[in-house]
Every structure is written in C-alpha cells, then in structure tokens.
Amino acid sequence: MQKSPVFLVIVSSLIGIGIILSFYGAQLTTQNLTVKEEKLVPGSSLEIMTELDLSRGETGVYGILVENFENDAISVTVIDPLGNQVISNTVDKESTEERFKIVSSGTYKLVIENSGLKETQIVAGVGHMPDNSTISVGITGFYILIIGLIGMVAIGIYAIRNKRKQRLN
C-alpha cells in the first residue's frame, strides 16, 4: 500500500493550517493598532494619536518601518495624555518596535520627525501591546508551517528511496 499520498495530504494540511494561523495571528496582533503611512520630507513630522485605556492593559507598543533609512535621521517621541514624554529615541534600524508603560488612560501621541537629508517613507503604528495568547496564535502557526515543510522534505526523501528500491527489484 502506498503511504506517500496519505502523508502528502497530512503534510499539505499542516502547511495550510500553519499559513492560516500565521496570517490570523498577524491580523489579531495588529487589529487594535492605529496605523499611518506617510512620506516625510526633511524637517517634517508625523503625528499619530490613539486612545489607550489603562484598564485594558498597562503596556503600549509602537512600531515603525522606515524606507530610505539614514542613521540618526528619524526620531520618535511618545507623549502621554498629561503632555509628558514617555519615550524619546532615535531610530537606529529600518524596523523598530518598542514597548512603553501606560501611566494613565487617555490620548497618547506618537511623533515621528525626519531631520535627515532625504525624503523617507514611514509606516508607523501605536496601540496596546497584544496579550500573550494573541501572539501565540501567530507563533503556533509558524511552527506548524515549519513542521509541514519538514514533513514535505521527508516525504520527498521517502518517495525517492521507494522508487530506487522498486527499480532494483
């Protein structure tokens, strides 16, 4: 009896489930973020305002993706509802994510400034840090996808060995 087709269906199912869980996990992770995309010319800034509720979580997060990256050109500031700076940093790589403590409920502001010499495309988001169960959906999907791909390689090796045995007999 040929076992390869059965294993192929199982492994293909694992790959499909892994892809679905990975995309679903990414969607769950980013659904509550306020995201904005904009080109920043030198000397300009981008502001993103979002409501953060202390009762929903004590940790906020922002993420920034920078195209045409320049060292020390993009600075990021998070301002709480009372007007205090929670974080003030310079972006040192193309993709940056950082967490911050939510001190009180209200409107938080993410300010991104371009002090470089080039126009830069920025994609930024700010919101509540997703809980561990939300993050684990995407991670689980990734691991199932890897298991499925390893299984696909194993089926290929198994099929090649069976073909060789059949030729020799």
Image (cartoon, grey):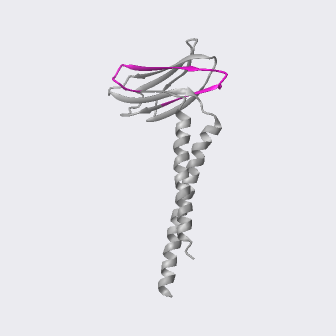
Q: Is residue 123 magenta?
A: no
Considering only vertical position in the picture, is 82 above or below 50? above
Residue that sits furthest to the top in the current view: 82
Is residue 45 shown in magenta?
Answer: yes
Residue 40: x, y in percent?
36, 24
Does 120 sit above or below residue 10?
above
Q: Residue at x 65, y 21 (%)?
A: 54
- Name the residue at the bottom extreme: 169
The image shows residue 109 at horizontal and vertical percentages of 51, 18
Q: Which residues are magenta?
A: 37-63
User: In the rendered picture of this protein, how many numbered marks are placed on residues?
Assistant: 0
Q: Residue at x 54, y 62 (%)?
A: 9
Q: Position of residue 31 (x, y in %)?
A: 53, 32
Q: Which residue sits at x=59%, y=30%? A: 129
Residue 122's quadrant in the figure?
Answer: top left
Res 121 → quadrant: top left
Q: Quadrant of the N terminus?
A: bottom right
Q: Image quarter for residue 116? A: top left
Q: In this orientation, which residue lies closer to the viewer: 112 or 33?
A: 33
Q: Is 77 above or below relative to 71?
A: above
Q: Main secondary structure of the magenta part?
A: strand
Question: Farthest residue in the right direction?
Answer: 55
Where residue 94 sits: x, y (%)? 43, 35
Q: Which residue occupies the foreground of this view, 50 or 59?
A: 50
